[in-house]
Image: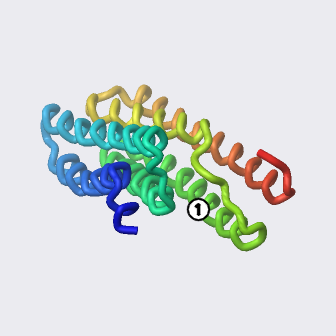
Amino acid sequence: MKKDIFSIPNILSFVRILLIPIFVWLYVTAGTSGEYYLAAAVVVASGITDFLDGQIARRCNMITEFGKFLDPLADKLTQGTLFLCIAINYPLMWILLAIWLLKEGFMAIMGLVLLKTKQTKLDGARWYGKVCTALIYAVMIALLLFPDMPEPLAAGGVFTCVFMVLMCLVMYLADYARVLRGEKR
């Protein structure tokens, strides 16, 4: 059990969680472009560890039940923190945060429903969830790197994320419906 908790992929997920307060402090206290760049660098490091933990887990046969819980938890904590912090400078982020919370809440409830009714769960992220996460990281990093981005461009990035999160919600809804009907995915 201890070996599973402290596997390399799980350690990378722990690192992502530890980067969250560092990002918050850097972002909230940022006053210059260089300080925003430093906050962006922390997000890039978090994104790299997210990519690496999945690659290492799959390629080195280090997938654990704890890792299946920890990796998405680190993702959700990171994304929620990004949305909350960036909303300080871009109020449209509140819309993205609300839609994202709706999607994540739906997925949590449906996960519990599947466990209770079918004794199963959706195993792992789908391709569209990964694309959504990558898009969110790209837009958030752009907003960090260009703190004086023109409002229409920033709004376009945020609404692109809103659209993608909504598309993921619809696609996950279809996945959950198929599983509840007993169909194969």
For badge 1, the amino acid type reads Gly
Task: Identify the residue shown where x is 25% and y is 37%.
Answer: 40
For the point 51% across and 49% down, the residue is 95
Q: Secondary structure at mark 1?
A: helix
Q: How many marks?
A: 1
Q: Residues within 10 Å of mark 1 (few under 14, many from 20)?
A: few
Residue 163 appears in the rendering: no
Quadrant in which the C terminus is drawn: top right
Q: Nearer the viewer, residue 15 or 81?
A: 15
Query: Where is residue 152, by image quadrant?
Result: top left
Tell me what residue is drawn at x 35 percent, y 39 percent. Answer: 47
Q: Is residue 112 left or right of residue 24?
A: right
Which residue in the structure is indicated by mark 1?
105
Dividing the picture into quadrants, the one containing residue 176 is: bottom right
| Residue 173, position as x, y percentages in the image | 73, 51
Residue at (14% x, 38% y) in the render:
35
Residue 65 relative to residue 108: left or right: left
Q: Nearer the viewer, residue 50 or 84?
A: 50
Q: State the colouring used for the structure image.
A: rainbow
Name the spot of residue 181 as percent of width and height, x first.
86, 57
Q: Is residue 6 above or below residue 38?
A: below
Side of 16 where 105 appears, left or right: right
Classify residue 25 as left or right of residue 185: left
Residue lying at the far bottom in this picture: please name it.
116
Quadrant in which the N terminus is drawn: bottom left
User: Percent position (x, y) of residue 13?
Assistant: 35, 52
- Residue 98: x and y in percent read 52, 55
